[in-house]
Every structure is written in C-alpha cells, then in structure tokens.
Image: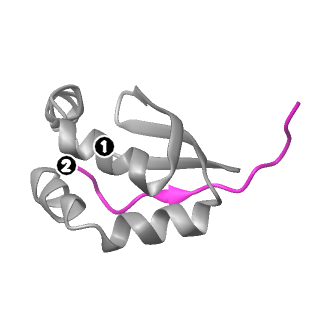
Amino acid sequence: MERLCFVLEVNEGEEERYDRVHQQMPPEVRQALLECGYENYTIFRHGNLVIGYSECEPDVETVLARQRSSPVFAEWATAMTGVAKKGLEVLEPVWRL
C-alpha cells in the first residue's frame, strides 16, 4: 500500500460545481474507484485549492494506470470538463509519523 496526495486548482466560479459533482457521484464511479485500488480516499477544498489523499493498493502507479484505462472515468472526465485549470499534480511525501 502506498499513499497518494494530490493538488488541483479549480477555476474561479466552478467551486460549487466541483463540490456538487462529487457529492452526486454515481455509484458506478465510487465502485470503479474501489476496484482501481483506492482506499480511505478523502478530498478537501479550500477556496480554489483541492487537496486529495488516498491509500492505494498495491501502489499509486498501478491505481492511476487502472483509473486511466477504465471507461467509467471517461464519463467522469466529461462531467468535470472546464472545472480545473489543469490536471492533478501528485505530491511527494516529505515526512510521516
């Protein structure tokens, strides 16, 4: 298991849409996230800054590859079109307790 942390900047005026799309996430997207290997997945938003954290099984690279190859996420990407300034940026850990 590896940890994933990412940041994303939401376009000005798209904050409510970002929240709404995630709050109304279809069950098949939630299931696909689990099948990709995401565990303990949480997203935080502070203004336009989004920070996401997840534990990934078996590792981050495998989980992200599974997500890229899943047709479910092609539809999700369409729902999110125009919301973010660019794709998510994966962060490297600095310290952990």
Q: Residue at x 76, y 50 (%)?
A: 93
Confirm whether the magenta stretch covers residue 88.
yes
Name above or below for residue 78 compared with residue 13: below
On screen, residue 12 versus residue 1, left or right, reads left
Name above or below for residue 70 compared with residue 36: below
Q: Residue at x 19, y 49 (%)?
A: 83
Query: Depth check: 14 or 67 in front?
Result: 67
What secondary structure is found at the residue carrying circle 1? helix
Question: In which quadrant is the C terminus drawn?
Answer: top right
Residue type beneath disc 1 = Gln
Query: Depth check: 59 or 35 in front?
Result: 35
Label number found at residue 77: none
Q: Residues within 10 Å of mark 2 (few under 14, many from 20)?
A: some
Confirm whether the magenta stretch covers residue 89.
yes
The image quadrant of residue 19 is top left
Q: Residues within 10 Å of mark 1 (few under 14, many from 20)?
A: few
Label number found at residue 31: 1
Q: Residue at x 64, y 58 (%)?
A: 58
Where residue 94 appears, as percent x and y from the top left, is: 82, 48
Q: Which residues are magenta?
A: 83-97
What secondary structure is found at the residue carrying circle 2? loop
Residue type beneath disc 2 = Val
On screen, residue 20 versus residue 52, left or right, reads left
Query: Depth check: 55 or 32 in front?
Result: 32
Assign the magenta stretch its main secondary structure. Answer: loop
On screen, residue 43 versus residue 17, left or right, reads right
Cα separation, mark 1 vs mark 2, equals 23 Å
Name above or below for residue 3 compared with residue 48: below
Label number found at residue 83: 2
Q: How many marks?
A: 2
